[in-house]
């Protein structure tokens, strides 16, 4: 044990932290006490055209006095997009035995990186049409994935070419800049974008954002402020073997792994912005969806600003002891935020009621877009019971739902979470909330991974938009499916919304 303690101390971790995580592996995480799925008119707002226009106008009228930012988790490697292509490369089988690889080859000219691929093949004495004619499909795919070609298998998603236009191609980074111009021009006429990236790819992001900024600032007469951050090593979590003992890497060190997107909570807290839009790097549909995206983003921003204004006013009046204010706050929490009070609330003293109401008001706020469930993977919107006995809106992952007692609730769920949020982490005094105070540590996950051919268990922190925001004031809004355009496998780029020509 002493040797293990020495290793852990040398690696900058404490034994107390490790023991706590070892205990978590042993006992696991409890299932979330789900009450029912959130649906339209029961936790999910469906805005009509008048409401969309009113909230959009409010946002447009307000944003020039606000620091508006886009927060884009962009650390994800693209390697998982190409899993089936790698399998074909490593096989001795025929192309038709690998449907995804076959579809990729049959549509190779539709991908926005086709011209780059052709140039790459010409450097080794071939070209795409010749390779197709000779049925040298592995040559084509290897030049997409490997360093001698485009090296897409090692790059992050944000730096791949996703869309082709008449005179240029765009990466997801480029598309996020375009979105920022559409709805994110805030105080001082600046579009603020923040990308969370891995250290190894930071230089590539700096080069890409610099190139895009230069082109777009000149074309659209706007200013960009681009910042980056990395997931902090202090948020890395212990990995264990299948017997729940610390997993030792090949060099004998104890393995600590990144704790999932929930580890970005610290990065979010450090944002200096009044309004923060959160959207994954790969969820960009290009020109075909950007106007609808703009419409709903602005409406969600206006809804948040209106709700926040009401909350701040209630906080001020509650602290001033205004007559009848408790009843007004109770109605607001129930009718506007959908919070059901615990059975014990009516038995509290007046002072205890004031404290309860204040705690419910003084929280970060988020408005989350929800799309109709079409079978896409991801968490969904549910009503869940909080530790204090109240019931509130939560984004819940499938793994958090008890398969024995609550599985039926999944079939009743009508929407899922596309990671489409606008939030504010500001207190009434303008300072940021300490976001860890509003996270639920009981909502982490344990997943099975592998390293060097050995199985291991990984500990994931409460997800950024799941348990990490468990105690936020939350509103769900239905958004059109066309605003959700993720690219999880390379052939997703063949979907209509990604084909802009």
Image (tube, rainbow, N blue to C red):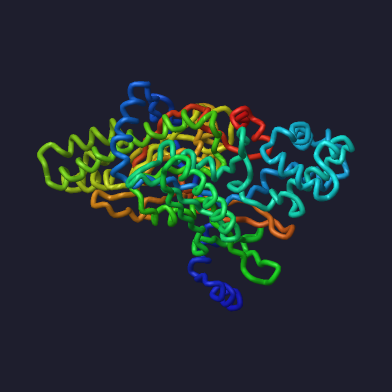
Q: Quadrant of residue 109?
A: top right
Q: Quadrant of the C terminus?
A: top right
Residue extending furthest toward the top: 49
Q: Nearer the viewer, residue 184 or 339?
A: 184
Q: Quadrant of residue 162?
A: top right
Q: Nearer the viewer, residue 192 or 377?
A: 192
Q: Quadrant of the N terminus?
A: bottom right
Figure check: 80 above or below 241: above
Residue 183 placement (x, y as % from top left)? 41, 37
Residue 383 placement (x, y as % from top left)? 41, 35
Residue 306 shows in the view? yes
Figure check: 253 above or below 381: below
Residue 370 placement (x, y as % from top left)? 46, 32
Residue at the (78%, 32%) spot, across then down = 106
Position of residue 148 in the picture relative to residue 14 (left or right): right
Residue 260 placement (x, y as % from top left)? 54, 52
Residue at the (77%, 37%) spot, across then down = 101
Residue 409 shows in the view? no
Residue at the (57%, 27%) spot, across then down = 374
Position of residue 314 in the picture relative to residue 402 (left or right): left
Residue extending furthest toward the left: 323
Position of residue 122 in the picture relative to residue 419 (left or right): right
Q: Nearer the viewer, residue 275 or 443?
A: 275
Q: Nearer the viewer, residue 103 or 290?
A: 290
């Amino acid at each position: 044990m002493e040797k293990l303690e020495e290793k852990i101390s040398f690696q900058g971790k404490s034994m107390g932290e490790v023991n706590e995580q070892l205990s978590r592996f042993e006992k696991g995480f409890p299932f979330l006490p789900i009450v029912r799925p959130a649906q339209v008119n029961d936790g999910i707002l469906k805005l009509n055209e008048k409401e969309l226009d009113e909230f959009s106008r409010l946002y447009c009228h307000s944003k020039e006095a606000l620091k508006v930012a886009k927060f884009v988790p962009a650390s994800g490697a693209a390697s998982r997009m190409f899993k089936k292509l790698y399998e074909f490369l490593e096989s001795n089988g025929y192309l038709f035995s690998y449907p995804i690889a076959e579809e990729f080859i049959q549509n190779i000219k539709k991908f926005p990186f086709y011209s780059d691929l052709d140039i790459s093949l010409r450097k080794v004495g071939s070209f795409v049409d010749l390779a197709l004619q000779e049925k040298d499909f592995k040559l084509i795919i290897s030049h997409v994935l490997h360093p001698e070609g485009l090296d897409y298998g090692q790059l992050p998603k944000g730096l791949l070419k996703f869309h082709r236009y008449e005179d240029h191609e765009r990466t997801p980074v480029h598309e996020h800049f375009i979105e920022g111009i559409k709805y994110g021009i805030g105080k001082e006429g600046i579009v603020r974008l923040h990308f969370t990236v891995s250290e190894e790819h930071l230089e590539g992001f700096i080069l890409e954002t610099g190139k895009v900024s230069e082109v777009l600032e000149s074309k659209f007469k706007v200013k960009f402020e681009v910042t980056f951050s990395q997931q902090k090593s202090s948020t890395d979590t212990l990995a264990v073997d299948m017997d729940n003992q610390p997993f030792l890497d090949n060099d004998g060190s104890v393995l600590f792994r990144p704790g999932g997107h929930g580890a970005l909570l610290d990065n979010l807290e450090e944002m200096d912005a009044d309004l923060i839009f959160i959207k994954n790097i790969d969820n960009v549909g290009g020109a075909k969806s950007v106007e609808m995206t703009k419409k709903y983003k602005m409406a969600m921003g206006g809804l948040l600003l209106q709700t926040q204004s009401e909350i701040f006013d209630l906080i001020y009046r509650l602290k001033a002891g205004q007559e009848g204010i408790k009843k007004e706050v109770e109605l607001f929490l129930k009718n506007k935020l959908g919070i059901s009070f615990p059975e014990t609330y009516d038995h509290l003293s007046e002072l205890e009621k004031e404290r309860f109401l204040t705690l419910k008001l003084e929280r970060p706020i988020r408005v989350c877009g929800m799309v109709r469930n079409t079978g896409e993977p991801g968490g969904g919107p549910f009503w869940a019971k909080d530790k204090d006995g109240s019931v509130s809106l939560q984004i819940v992952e499938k793994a958090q739902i008890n398969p024995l007692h609550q599985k039926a609730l999944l079939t009743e769920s009508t929407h899922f979470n596309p990671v489409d949020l606008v939030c504010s982490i500001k207190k009434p005094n303008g300072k940021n909330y300490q976001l860890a105070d509003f996270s639920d540590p009981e909502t982490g996950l344990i997943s099975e991974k592998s390293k060097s051919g050995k199985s291991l268990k990984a500990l994931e922190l409460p997800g950024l938009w799941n348990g990490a925001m468990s105690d936020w004031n939350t509103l769900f809004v239905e958004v059109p499916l066309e605003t959700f355009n993720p690219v999880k496998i390379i052939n997703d780029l063949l979907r209509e919304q990604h084909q802009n020509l």
